[in-house]
Image (cartoon, grey):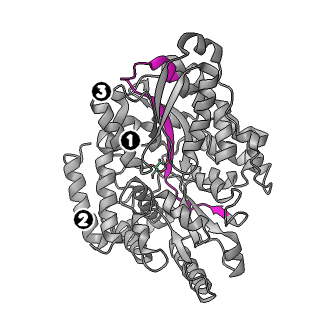
Amino acid sequence: MGGASAARRRTPAARPRRTPHEQAVGRVKRRVVVLVASTAVLALAVGLSVAAAGTRGSAAKHTTAAMKAPKVPNAAAIKAKYGGQSITFIGDSVGGGHTRDLAIAKRFTHDTGIKVKIIPHSTASDQAYAQLARTFSAHSSSIDVAMIDVVWPGIRARHLLDLRRYAGDRPAKNCAAIVANDTVRGRLVAMPWFADVGLLYYRKDLLAKYGVEVPRSWPALAAAARRIQDAERAAGKDRMWGFVWQGRAYEGLTCDALEWIASQDGGHIVEPDGRISIDNPRAARAISAAAGWVGTISPRGVLNYAEEEARGVFQSGNAVFMRNWPYARALAESEGSPVRGRVGVAELAEGVGALGGAQLAVSRYSRHPAFAASLVMALTGRAEQKRRALAGGFNPTLPGLYRDPEIRRANPYYEVIAQALAHAVARPAAVTGTRYNRVSSAFANAVHAVLAGQADAATALHSLEGNLMRISRGGRW
Ligand code: GLC
């Protein structure tokens, strides 16, 4: 699983106990971006920058035409061969994801005669994973096509069809790092669909009202959140909170907590060389600081928030800052949104957001591999990626699309996203391989216990390290 590791990693990798000299070197190096960089993710990011440079300041306009699903390529040939058949697609569920999937499926059925049953997966990524795992382990043919998280291709590979014979020149046109992520032992087990990165959302109007700059560090964010929250409450907005994020014990918390830790030089849980690094004082400080937000600048309910709960609070106007993925912008800016026109997007504190994203894969147990693959190709193709970028704010995985003038006009924040992608931190999925899910869930649970006040950070991370040693059979992933 090269791609998840292909994004940049923050230097230096945390070592459990460093000498004062090493710590000083670390602090200097932290400012310098010398990481295991993927030129491909960078190329995608540079493409984004170039696109943004020409369009800065232009307003986001989502035409209704942009919402229409595009024509399916080679539809007539597909129809002649497979018309009348049906397939099942386990698709998106977050934000407007399901509605968008329904639209493309309708078009696909119209053009090809193939019926598509769409089942939205669970909104929590790891529950969605468990759902698929059950079907796959039963070798069930009930699923043909599935949306899979960027951290899954390595774990799920043996249940997924090799798509090379259906993909033509598609892989070459895609972001190479993501294609590498989706290629496991030479088999292309998924097609890149969209790229994600953790971002900081803020209320432009409130920051301007209180003369507060967009915070660049976690303490600055906490201070700004506190100040604005308190002032707004004093002015009668008693439901206002400073900062909302993903605090439920699930994959999303793994992303948030990795951002806090990696951005403060606490490492990456497990380093690319397999060393378990989580039991270190910087990581403990980062988690303790986040625990201090709960009940002060973040509602206690944040302990049960996934992406959509955080967006609900922010979009209804009850939060100053939010951590979320790019999809949230299009929704917060949509017609009828109480915060429309007042939403700013920036890189997270210290410029470190988690790398995320989704791929589409065909089950190896599908009875209809050929036309299931044609649905995957239609959904991940240029026209649909463009529609998703315009209508949903999803980042295409086709670098060429960032030169598209309509896409350039649609999102004034592509430059920010470009920077965020270039600085993204990968979860340790590549190195932990098939054990990644156990690692992520042990990590999220340990962090959650600290956030909930049930454990202190140093103790929780120490026992997590022991737990990860056992999962990895002594660090031998
Ligand atoms: C987003 C990301 C995905 C991540 C998930 C966590 O869907 O694209 O990579 O695992 O959020 O909740």
Q: Nearer the viewer, mark 3 or mark 1?
A: 3
Residue 258 image-quadrant placement? bottom left
Q: Which amino acid, by three-letter code, is at mark 1?
A: Ala
Which of the two discs, 3 and 1, labels the residue nearer the N terminus? 3
The residue carrying mark 1 is 430
Q: Judge left or right: residue 467 versus residue 161.
A: left
Where does the magenta region start and end?
A: 344-373
Disc 3 secondary structure class: loop
Disc 2 secondary structure class: helix
Q: Is residue 215 magenta?
A: no
Q: Is mark 2 within 8 Å of ligand 1?
A: no
Q: Is mark 1 within 8 Å of ligand 1?
A: no
The residue carrying mark 2 is 462
Residues at marks 3 and 1, CA–CA distance in whole angstroms: 25 Å
Q: Which mark is on residue 461?
A: none
Tally of numbered discs: 3
Above or below — where is 104 with respect to 337?
above
Assess disc 3: are there few (<14), some (14-19) or many (≥20) residues with their C-alpha within 10 Å of its C-alpha.
some
Q: Which amino acid, by three-letter code, is at mark 3?
A: His
* Residue 253 horizontal/vertical position (percent): 41, 59
Which of the two discs, 1 and 2, labels the residue nearer the N terminus? 1
* Residue 308 horizontal/vertical position (percent): 51, 58
Q: Quadrant of the C terminus?
A: top left
